[in-house]
Amino acid sequence: MDYKKLFFTILIIIFGVIFRIFLNETIAIPNFEAVTALSLLSGVFVGGVYSILIPLSIMFFSDLYFGNTFIYLFTWSAFVLIGISGNIFKRDSKHYLLKITGSGVLSVLFFYLWTNLGWWLISGMYPMSFSGLIQCYIAALAFLKNQLISVILFVPGFNVIFSFLIDKVFSSSQKVKKHGTFILPEINH
């Protein structure tokens, strides 16, 4: 078992849960959130099954605090798909930070379209017609703006923090090996 990768995953989950609660309770700006950025970067930095486990765990544990409705089927699945999409990025590629931040913006647009489709389907607030769907999307534009701002801030910020942790803390003074998308110190058993 890769204990350093597991430890890094647990750190991201704990941080994600605490930060989601903090942003909702303290900042209280609707949809100004870090889960999109953490989901996307979990695919980049940890990859594999962890890119599914991290967003699901953040949402599950923070939803124990907040509660949820059937919209979770749409929100949770959106974050999982965003996490999986992060697997395609390589940190050492040309213009990586621009690409990953742009992908964060696309992730927010996907989240907006998918979760508002879900809200239109299950909330009963809008007519079950094309115009009802458009009304739902229009009503959610303020939430979209806040989520776009958060992803533009958090994707580059968390990227710098995760890069430091992996490149400096987890690989300090040890032989390093590449393991999936995560660069780890070699563990002697």
Image (cartoon, rainbow, N blue to C red):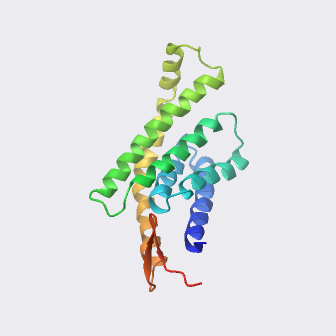
* Residue at image point 37% right, 52% down: 100
In the image, is residue 8 above or below residue 131? Answer: below
Residue 183: x %, y % from top left: 44, 71
Mark yes or no: residue 57 visible: yes
In this view, which residue lies farthest toward the left? 94
Q: Is residue 21 visible to us here? A: no
Foreground of the two, 47 or 166: 47
Left or right: 111 in relation to 160: right
- Image quadrant containing the N terminus: bottom right
Task: Please tell me which residue is depicted at 37% across the width and 50% down the height of the picture.
Answer: 101
Image height of 36 relative to 45, above or below:
above
Please identify the quadrant where the C terminus is shown: bottom right
Place residue 15 in its image quadrant: bottom right
Count of numbered circles on the image: 0
How far across and how far down the image is residue 91, in percent? 36, 62
69 and 23: which is toward the camera:
69
183 relative position to 1: left or right: left
Residue 62's spot in the image, x, y percent?
67, 51
Picture layout, residue 105 above or below residue 172? above
- Quarter holding residue 78: top right
Q: Is residue 112 above or below residue 17?
A: above
Answer with left or right where residue 162 lies relative to residue 99. right
Residue 151, given in percent of the width and then of the height, sits at 44, 48
Task: Give me the residue at 68% from left, 33% from top.
Answer: 70
Residue found at x 64% / y 38%: 72
Identify which residue, 94 or 119, lies in the foreground.
Answer: 94
